[in-house]
Amino acid sequence: MSEPDLETLRDEVDLLRRELAAARAEQEKWGEREARLRKSRDRAAKAAETLSALLAERLRGETAVAGAGEKSWWRRGSTSVTAEEAGQLELIRQSPLFDAAYYLRTHLDVAKRGEDPGVHFLRHWDHPFRKPSEAFDIAQYVLDHPEVIVERINPLVHFLASAEAEGADAYPPASR
């Protein structure tokens, strides 16, 4: 075999340089696209955060109005609750462990039907387990307190009515 001549080697090196330059240009193009996508994602996250805050504020106002006996915009009419449910609903709504905006964002079926998130969570927390907020792990609570399944008690209501809730801002507590 003969050794490649100097001209052939130069041509190959030149070809490799062009390929490398093309690969760098392609990498730069993808980097720019990634930067645009990140910027778009950040704008969307900020918009979602703003909308969530506005929704939470609206929910607080609607909850106060509904609690005063007036109709809210939920379910295009009124959602009647029993006297027992009213007490439990008040307990849920007053708790920082229930975040109505989070609940609606996480459970779009509830939002699409226009259901009151507090009433829905009170009644339908278990099919499937529906977290009332990021701070309350309902599955862990049920594992720790299986009586809520047997007795058909809403886990958040059960927790809030217990001494365990005293000063708690999450379940399970951070010390676990």
Image (cartoon, rainbow, N blue to C red):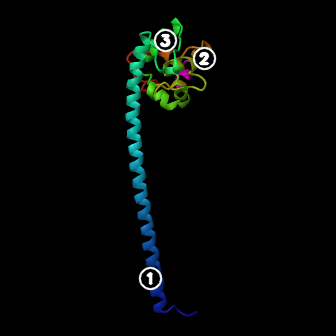
N-terminal of the pair, mark 3 or mark 2, is 3
Q: Which residues are magenta?
A: 140-145
Q: Which residue is mark 1?
A: 14
Q: Which quarter of the rendering shows the N terminus? A: bottom right
Residue at (39% x, 54% y) in the render? 35
Q: Which residue is mark 2?
A: 149
Residue at (56% x, 23% y) in the render? 143
Q: How many C-alpha atoms fall within 10 Å of the one at disc 3: few (<14), some, or many (≥20)? A: many
N-terminal of the pair, mark 1 or mark 3, is 1
Q: Position of residue 20 (x, y in %)?
A: 44, 73
Calculate the distance from the C-alpha at mark 1 to the C-alpha at mark 3: 77 Å
Instruction: Give the vertical position of 113 relative to 44 (above or below).
Output: above
Task: Say what amino acid the circle numbered 1 marks.
Answer: Asp
Q: Position of residue 144 (x, y in %)?
A: 54, 21
Q: Which quadrant holds residue 59?
A: top left
| Disc 3, SS | helix
- Check contact, mark 3 vs mark 2: CB within 8 A: no
Q: Which dot, 1 or 2, sits closer to the camera?
A: 1
| Disc 2, SS | helix
How many numbered marks have been drawn onto this rendered protein structure? 3
Calculate the distance from the C-alpha at mark 3 to the C-alpha at mark 2: 17 Å
Instruction: Give the vertical position of 137 relative to 12 (above or below).
Output: above
Q: Which dot, 1 or 3, sits closer to the camera?
A: 3
Is 115 a magenta residue?
no
Q: Which quadrant holds residue 17?
A: bottom left
Q: Which residue is mark 3?
A: 88
Task: Say what amino acid the circle numbered 2 marks.
Answer: Ile
